[in-house]
Amino acid sequence: MTITTMETRGTVVFPENFVWGAATASYQIEGATKADGRGPSIWDTFSATPGKVREGDTGEVACDHYHRYRDDVALMKDLGLNAYRFSVAWPRIQPTGSGAANQAGLAFYDRLVDTLLEAGITPYVTLYHWDLPQALEDLGGWTSRDTSYRFADYAAIMYDRLGDRVSHWTTLNEPWVSAFLGYGNGVHAPGRTSAHDALRAAHHLLLGHGLAARALRSAGAEEIMLVVNSAPVLTPAQVNDPAAAVSEADAAAAHRAHALLTRQFLDPALLGRYPVEVLRAAERNGGTAHVLDGDLEIINAPIDLVGINYYNPCVVEDGPGLPADAAWPGSEGVRFATVEAPVTAMGWPIVPSGLSRLLVRLSQDYPQVGLMVTENGAAFDDVVEDGRVHDDARLAYLEGHLRAAHEAIEAGADLRGYLVWSLLDNFEWAEGYGRRFGVVHVDYTTQARTLKDSAFWYRDVINRNGL
Ligand code: FCB
């Protein structure tokens, strides 16, 4: 692969106060799914359902972070992280998704936050990284409008408990994935498969975001962020040649895919309106009756940052006559193409230049917010040899993407920080434990943690504030 526009070597220095950190999510690392009054989440149910997760893996034990968080924070300190992005398991706080808070659940996040602060690490709290209380799913989950209001109640409980020590709040992680993999193609919990449900879920997630953002703000939250999985939408030719000519039909396909993936969430949240492509998709799939007057105003609550989780570009071309993909209602006539590029163990193409394109575009389209890379990283088949993990491919992936991030800053993107996905190897959703994304290796038999070469390298990057 040739990365024509990228700096590929040489020193780069990031801006002063650039935030360096790592990210995880509750269900992927905590384990202890029945401890201290935690209720079941949709991921407990889903992973216990035969055939849903590779090898039948579940989050029951995961990295046992619930019991080992002190050691894990010590690792973070050793790496020199400035920031740690983690999520709160809603069913630890409200075991059935509503009503009084479970004090034992709150106490865990209290201890975690205190331990981070003692280590000089800034907590970035995500309120929802996919582990919806099962009791709420039983009432309709995100297809039910009531869930949005329950989410705002829960956000207020969390702010009330941690707001004296936590300034950085994220409402949702990747609502596109929650809605369209959870309710559209059913690859994620709760495993429903209806375009109408998926579009309703997307709207109620956004409504929940807006209500929670308002609740957080009125309680005094300093910084509020929405995290999306975004990607530049490219034609196959553009992957290796950003300047490649694009036909009108391919450009129309790319425009639509961008509306469905990114603008579906960022336009309502930041501009107070839905893209017409999304409204059309809803009209073709059961209608827009779930979008009530005043909703967009709520969703458009002021926020400070958009978090970008970037792994690979979205590559499409015109596909006359093709039906919509189950995860992409509204994508009729769009062909999702394969890419000429090396891939990770997930099969995801490695295209670092996609990150700079994306950051520059989002900065231009939404100048009212700052940006942060809240996830970026790669799974490879790591092996521990004599106590070391020589994960050169991950290191190269991270370096390429950091150079791309730096290039975006040079081109004017307002990028405030970078959080690697992930601190630890963990439960990779439908892929189970077979996909290792950590800069720290986890032996799931012994729970031993081993710093991979990428972790030592990342420590130097943080230390130098650059490459
Ligand atoms: C993102 C998720 C995160 C992790 C990475 C690989 O979509 O937010 O939990 O699974 O992908």
Image (cartoon, rainbow, N blue to C red):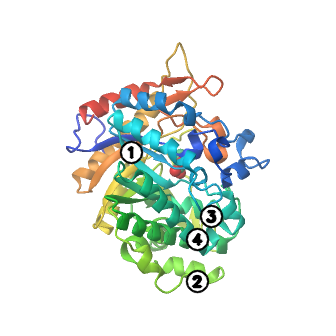
Amino acid type shown at disc 3? Ala
Quadrant containing the C terminus in the rendered view: top left
Circle 2: element type: loop
Q: Which mark is residue 417?
A: none
Q: Answer with mark 1 or mark 2, whichever residue precedes in sequence.
A: 1
Mark 4 nearby-residue class (10 Å; few <14, some 14–19, many ≥20):
many
Find disc 4 in the rendering and name its residue.
331
Q: Residue at x 25, y 51 (%)?
A: 409
Percent of width and height locating residue 456: 38, 25
Mark 2 nearby-residue class (10 Å; few <14, some 14–19, many ≥20):
some
**In 3D space, how far apart are the residues under numbered discs 3 and 4 (Cα atoms)?**
9 Å
Which residue is the extreme one toward the top?
A: 386
From the viewer's perspective, tell me whether residue 372 is left or right of residue 145.
left
Percent of width and height locating residue 435: 60, 37
**In 3D space, how far apart are the residues under numbered discs 4 and 2 (Cα atoms)?**
17 Å
Which residue is the extreme one toward the right?
A: 50
Find disc 1 in the rendering and name its residue.
123
Q: Is mark 3 within 8 Å of ligand 1?
A: no
Q: Nearer the viewer, mark 1 or mark 4?
A: 1
Amino acid type shown at disc 1? Pro
Q: Nearer the viewer, mark 1 or mark 3?
A: 1
Find disc 2 in the rendering and name its residue.
288
Quadrant containing the N terminus in the rendered view: top left
Amino acid type shown at disc 4? Ser
Q: Is residue 4 visible?
A: no
Q: Which mark is residue 327?
A: 3
Q: Answer with mark 1 or mark 4, whichever residue precedes in sequence.
A: 1
Q: Nearest the camera: 99 or 238?
A: 99
Circle 1: element type: strand
